[in-house]
């Protein structure tokens, strides 16, 4: 490694810089790989089964369904969850899984997993999940019979070795690259010249552009129009920076549509299946032929209609291909001793099957204008040898740099869309995060080539007062509200933002910034806390383990009581008629699960269940609601707020609300951090 770097230094300073940076990325990714693998090992060996189930990482008990060969000629098996369907699980397309059984006569619920769980000696891959039904692709080697014949069977997520392998390979390939990929590598890692410097010199590189007159789009605002034009003019790279509610997806769809007037086909990727689904659906609505590699997270006819698997099954030649594949399986299963023509027959059938598969694929890929997949999914064998003019990466600020390089090798230029002031990539290793693994390729280009960035500045989601704090703190006060949403509210003279300070619940009063809560006898707005909360309630956080973080039961109860009171003020009929929707957010999984249980028990909310969703901050990324309540949970004498120091996560939380935002939290704990102090004071001044 050191020899390689020494040689590179003599070649070119730009190449040296980019190779050193990529080498560091690889080392940090290796740290992350080791940390995640170790965490998985500890979870498998030490964590109780019920804890895995509650985390959403396992289904138990499991009902086995039928097994069959799918259209991709994979052996798959259906499984059905029999446990608590209120628990949100983490299974999705492409994730590796393993089956296990719980030894008879032992519950496996309270002990360690190693004491009661026995794992089957193979892994599978999630094909798709629909509610409590999952289809898993498994090896076609006879081992599935052992699972189908066993009792007390479960399934859990397995360590994702494949994704890491793809990322390591991508980094290695980029470090070796010449030609276009090598050029993009050096460009992304090298700052551009400043306008005063004139021509390129001194080891600097500037992103190249085409020169043509900008286009006008009557249905886009000025900054959206600028962003589309910058995408069209970019030879190398462009970035669409979309703060909350600014129409990033609308802009990106238009940029893709206009690019397809110049190019026959483009590649569209995102970090998560959900993000790929979202952009694919919007492109289909725009009339674009999308071919989705992989299955969607929401399994319905509309989403499935543009998947590769569904299109493959619908092809006129598929029936013949299926018959040939069945004949191959039958021939192998019933091979007769002394059959001299066995190999000849088998090879002939296989050749015919391959020929048909190539023909079907050629037609499907030939017709599609957009190929859509996750970043890791772009390494699928179906895309082997494919090249594209342009790659669009949506939600690029949530993707590890190594993952972005996987599809970049197939393209000439890259368009990033996202917001590095919102959710960052998930990094498990604290050391790797501190050393820079969390810095994304999009952020790197924003720093090195600010001329490629267009900030979308008009937001269409929030009341002006909800939006203003985020705009000031994160976006240099550049984001403005569209006139039609500036004063939107649910109730007349309603204050759009409130902070209910639980630290002041010590006696007779509870203070809400912007409003003062009196006692029950003259209570026009909220609730008599002393008469509604559980008698033993304490507004203190509790630690419930590394996986779930912390919980504040009193704050959870108060959250739903505040929502109940607000609903009473609006009126049942209006809520149902106008379908006013609500999001209840907490940064901690334990608090989310507790809130869901409380919500389920409360009779008052029964008519509104379909309108209320409870989730973590990450679960609400890209979503919006009329009313948002945030339970911050943290309440301690030391002022410790843990990962709430990651302000990008809080930016997501406070920008989900269209008309009403209510924050519940212990101000004496939270306001020791300057961000929360400023937020608290901002709300107080409304």
Image: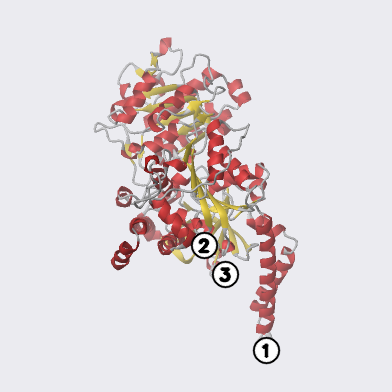
Residue visible at 58% across and 28% down in the picture: 607
Point out residue 7 in the picture as x, y percentages from the top left corner.
31, 66
With respect to residue 228, does 21 lie above or below?
A: below
Residue visible at 53% across and 45% down in the picture: 85
How much space separates mark 2 and mark 1, taking CA atoms? Answer: 36 Å
- Which of the 4 image quadrants contains residue 549? top left
Label 1 vs label 3, nearer the camera = 1
Point out residue 584 in the picture as x, y percentages from the top left corner.
47, 32
Name the residue beneath numbered marker 2: 124
Name the residue beneath numbered marker 3: 140
Crowd around label 2: few <14 · some 14–19 · many ≥20 (10 Å): many
How much space separates mark 1 and mark 3, taking CA atoms? Answer: 25 Å
How much space separates mark 3 and mark 2, taking CA atoms? Answer: 10 Å
Q: Is residue 297 left or right of residue 301?
A: left
**Front residue of this view, candidates 458 and 309:** 458
Give the mark, 3 or 2, whose residue is nearer the N terminus.
2
- Assess whether mark 2 and mark 3 are in contact (beta carbons under 8 angstroms): no
Q: Secondary structure at mark 2?
A: strand
Residue visible at 50% across and 54% down in the picture: 375
Name the residue beneath numbered marker 1: 340
Point out residue 594 in the picture as x, y percentages from the top left corner.
43, 37
């Amino acid at each position: 490694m050191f020899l390689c770097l020494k040689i590179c230094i003599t070649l070119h300073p730009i190449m040296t810089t980019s190779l050193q940076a990529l080498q560091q990325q690889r080392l940090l990714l290796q740290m992350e790989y080791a940390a995640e693998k170790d965490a998985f090992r500890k979870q498998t060996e030490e964590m109780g089964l019920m804890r895995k189930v509650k985390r959403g990482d396992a289904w138990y008990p499991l009902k086995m369904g039928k097994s069959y060969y799918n259209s991709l000629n994979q052996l798959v098996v259906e499984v059905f969850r029999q446990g608590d369907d209120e628990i949100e699980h983490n299974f999705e397309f492409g994730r590796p899984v393993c089956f296990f059984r719980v030894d008879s006569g032992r519950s496996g619920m309270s002990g360690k997993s190693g004491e009661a769980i026995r794992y089957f000696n193979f892994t599978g891959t999630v094909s798709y999940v629909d509610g409590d039904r999952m289809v898993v692709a498994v090896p076609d080697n006879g081992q599935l019979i052992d699972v189908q014949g066993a009792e007390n069977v479960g399934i859990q997520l397995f360590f994702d070795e494949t994704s890491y392998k793809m990322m390591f390979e991508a980094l290695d390939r980029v470090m070796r690259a010449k030609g276009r990929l090598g050029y993009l590598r050096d460009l992304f890692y090298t700052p551009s010249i400043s306008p005063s410097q004139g021509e390129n010199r001194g080891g600097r590189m500037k992103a190249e552009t085409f020169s043509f007159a900008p286009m006008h789009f009557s249905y886009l605002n000025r900054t959206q129009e600028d962003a589309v034009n910058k995408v069209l003019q970019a030879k190398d790279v462009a970035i669409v920076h979309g703060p909350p509610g600014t129409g990033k997806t609308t802009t990106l769809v238009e940029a893709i549509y206009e690019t397809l007037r110049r190019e026959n086909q483009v590649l569209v990727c995102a970090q998560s299946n959900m993000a790929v689904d979202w952009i694919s659906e919007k492109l289909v609505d725009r009339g674009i032929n999308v071919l989705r590699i992989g299955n969607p997270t929401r399994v319905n006819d509309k989403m499935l209609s543009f998947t590769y698997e569904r299109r493959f099954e619908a092809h006129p030649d598929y029936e013949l291909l299926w018959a040939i594949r069945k004949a191959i399986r039958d021939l192998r299963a019933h091979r007769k001793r002394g059959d001299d023509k066995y190999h000849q027959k088998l090879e002939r059938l296989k050749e015919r099957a391959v020929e048909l598969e190539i023909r079907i694929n050629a037609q499907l890929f030939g017709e599609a204008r957009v190929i859509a997949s996750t970043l890791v999914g772009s390494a699928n064998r179906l895309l082997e040898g494919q090249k594209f003019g342009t790659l669009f990466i949506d939600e690029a600020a949530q993707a590890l740099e190594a993952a972005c390089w996987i599809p970049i090798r197939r393209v000439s230029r890259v368009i990033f869309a996202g917001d590095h002031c919102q959710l960052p990539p998930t990094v498990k290793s604290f050391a790797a995060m501190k050393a820079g693994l969390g810095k994304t390729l999009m952020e790197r280009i924003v720093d090195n080539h600010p001329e490629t960035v267009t900030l979308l500045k008009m937001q269409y989601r929030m009341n002006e007062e909800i939006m203003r704090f985020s705009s000031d703190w994160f976006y240099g006060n550049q984001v403005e509200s569209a006139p039609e949403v500036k004063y939107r509210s649910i109730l007349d003279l309603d204050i759009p933002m409130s902070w209910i300070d639980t630290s002041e619940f010590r006696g007779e009063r509870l203070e809400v910034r912007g409003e003062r809560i009196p006692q029950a006898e003259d209570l026009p707005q909220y609730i008599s806390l002393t008469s509604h909360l559980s008698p033993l309630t304490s507004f203190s956080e509790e630690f419930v383990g590394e996986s779930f973080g912390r919980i504040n039961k009193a704050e959870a109860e108060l959250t739903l009581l505040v929502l109940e009171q607000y609903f009473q003020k609006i009126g049942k009929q209006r809520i149902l008629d106008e379908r006013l929707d609500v999001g209840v957010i907490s940064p901690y999984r334990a608090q989310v699960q507790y809130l869901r249980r409380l919500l389920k028990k409360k009779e008052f909310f029964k008519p509104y269940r379909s309108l209320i969703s409870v989730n973590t901050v990450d679960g609400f990324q890209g979503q919006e609601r009329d009313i948002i309540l945030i339970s911050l949970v943290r309440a301690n004498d030391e002022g410790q707020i843990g990962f709430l120091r990651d302000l990008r996560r809080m930016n997501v939380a406070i920008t989900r609300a269209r008309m009403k935002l209510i924050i519940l939290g212990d101000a004496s704990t939270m306001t020791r951090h300057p961000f929360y102090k400023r937020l608290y004071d901002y709300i107080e001044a409304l």
